[in-house]
Amino acid sequence: MHHRCSGLLLTVIAVGSLGLMSGCIGKGTTGQGGSGVQTVTLSPTADLSLEFGSTQNFTAVARNSAGGTVFSPVQYTSDNNASLTISTGGVACAGSWDSLSNPVVCTPGVAGIANVTAVVDGVSSAPTKVYIHQHVQNIAVTPVSVHQCAKPGITCPCFSQGEIFDFQATAFSANNVDVTNTVGPFNWATSNANVLTIDTNKDLANNQVQVTANNPGVTKIVATVSGTTSTPIDYTTCLVKSIKLQVQNGSGNSVTINAGGTKTIVAEAVDTLDVPLSKPPLTWSTSNPEIATVSGGVVTGRQEGGTANISASCTPPTCNIGVLPGLPIYSTGGTTQKGQPAFSVITTHVTQSKPPTGTAWTATTDCADNFNCTSVMFPVTPGNTPIGSSVTLPFTPNAMLFTPAGTRVYLGSDHGLMSVDVTVSPLTVSMVSAQTTPCNVAVCGKPLAISDDGNKIVVSDTKSSPNQVYIFDAAHVANPPVDLLIAGATAAAFSPDQMKLFITTSDGRLFVYSTVDALHEVTVAAPARGVNFSADGSFAYVAGTPANAVSGYATCNLNNMGASTSLASNPLLIFPLPDIAEDHVVITLGNGNDPTEHSVITQNLISLEPPNLQFLTAQFTRDELDNPSQLVCDGTQPKTQHTSPVFWPNTSNGFTAGNSVDLGQGNFTPLYTKLIGDGSQVIVVARNIPAVLLFNVASGTTSSFPLSDGALPRAATATTDGTQIFVAACDAFQDNDPGKPCTNGSVHIVNAQQGGDIQQAIYTNVNTGDSMCTNLPGIPCLPNLMAIRPQ
């Protein structure tokens, strides 16, 4: 249909031969001097599809050799006046105008193809092709051919990553007549471009498209022409069913690297058709980003020694896309398709030649809301000059948290969320919003948790009515914070893959927020307290539900996976130890013809239950799917549903309670508790106990390192490797009475390797004496907020 010059010649007689013959050539022509017109651009340029009697506006721009606009008369022409006429002003009619100079009525014409061109001073534009046709009532999209699986005799339910396939659209008029050949090219779209890629540049018919399977997930494909859109058809890039990990050029499930060193972990991801993915969109996770980070399978050791568990998952919304509820798949271990042993988790030990010097940042809440009282934040580092440069805070902070990378510290307040980049000088304070009201914009409240990538900060607002929880995204500061109506939130933890956020409240409720699924409240039997995650992140350990117990909740679907036996007292916090054991077994159930490979993971835990520390052991299994129909987010029983963790064996109790060790301090109130990076010790600093307690995990014994002058702790923090503990303490009380206000305080630096409390750092403000704030009447204010900077 590109040879229609006969219609052009009819029009030539009326408007001049030079421009119209150029239009027949099919590309712009250069002017012969005079006006200086070099190019003419017609808009729209893309192919058009018009129903009988419809209209379309065209415009044209002429430019000279310098790119300037030339204002000269434009002549618009059609090479098929039986199907389309165009007025002198550039308005096209899918039929015939009653007048070209003053068009009012467009009378439908006949089906056909017309090329529209614009001519200015003898220079012609490239033509725009217009398809004129009957009204399109509906469109059907179908495969061009039958999609066959590698297994003969069955139709594939999905397309493996990288697989190419063609679809076609058929257009029907109101009387169900096929008008596909008259409507021109179809526009194709998908509801999720990450699941497939559309390529319309192939040498295909106007009604066909070629798509390539991209990332695992489900989507819909539609075709549109002349304002009518087809009924969507479903398309699935085969979902991931298993992930297995191996150490590159290594064996086993454990590696050792130096601080700053790297190691590569290779993942085999297989889809539901047993086809390996060449580019699996996996989420790599670390159980402790302050010890080891991971990106694309490359693990990097941080500067402080310790142990971190590295795992990989197919996590929505970047993998298994569009499946609701969200369907994460965690690494399972077992045997690769090449028959090599693989694992669910790779345990990474980071060694250091010498512990780095830690820096603790400290602040105070003592200013409260006193008028004109200004707080400061300052760093403390062991050495001859322990106090570094301080920074004035615009509002009294209530908590402080560092990002895992250690570059920025966030401080909460009743007037908005503050942050300080500690890598630059001079230090400056940034507010997440220039506004201090309303609180859902300023992000008022107490920060509870920061995601492993350092971008999402969870803030509990217990001042506003009703109470709320905000999630501020530092990577998308223009977006308003997520606003959740959750009252009394006291603790929060992100899953290692950052898909789920578990939030506990003061009245014992448990909420789970997801980037994919709706906010969900999980029914708990008693006040839930601390939250932590299993080695692979597939389920959460929740302390205090039911009473005197620890429970496991599947990250995937939040099913209760079982609880520990009754413990000596109600646990406040739960600490998974980083060293795990992983075994592989093959189980045959039912008729004996259904073997399933299981990875059985054993992880020890310690819960804080004043006056005790309690040992527990959790054992859970990860299964490789052997049937795509099992790809559901459910973990209630082994074998029948495989994608969630299942406690092993198949009982309601996946925990074994071990020894309960009394720390010998009575029923204390903890201010700070930390399992150090290699899992060998637990640091405990408690209110009214003038010492730092170090619990040795291997021996089950406790050492006590007294604070000088019997100082009583107000806050504490410690380096990841546990070599330096910083304690903000009260050194003296009014009338030497601990029940009265504190009159003097300092930051005590405790080093168990060098004899305990080796240094006391006192912050001095030249305007008010030994004080952390200005213009506070009465006694000085003293540090009671602390956070260590990760290195």
Image (cartoon, helix red, strand yellow):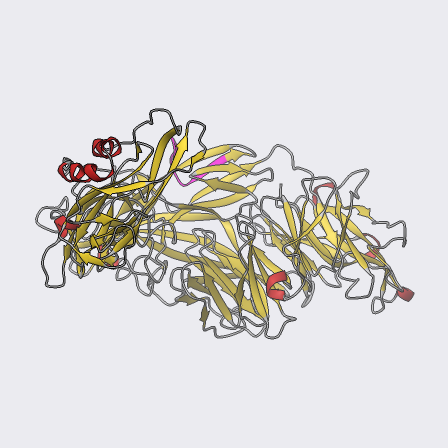
In screen coordinates, is 400 left or right of 783?
Answer: left
Image quarter of the N terminus: top left
Q: Residue sitting at 25 percent across and 42 percent down? A: 77
The prevailing secondary structure element of the residues shown in magenta is loop
Residue 775 visible at all: yes
Residue 371, horizontal then vertical, whole percent: 82, 65
Residue 614, horizontal then vertical, whole percent: 55, 61
Q: Residue sitting at 57 percent across and 45 percent down? A: 290
Q: Residue sitting at 74 percent across and 47 percent down? A: 750
* Magenta-drawn segment: 248-256
Residue 378, horizontal then vertical, whole percent: 76, 48
Residue 624 visible at all: no
| 557 shown above or below 357 | below
In screen coordinates, is 329 left or right of 272?
Answer: right
Residue 332, horizontal then vertical, whole percent: 34, 49
Of the pair 154 and 428, the residue shown nearer to us: 428
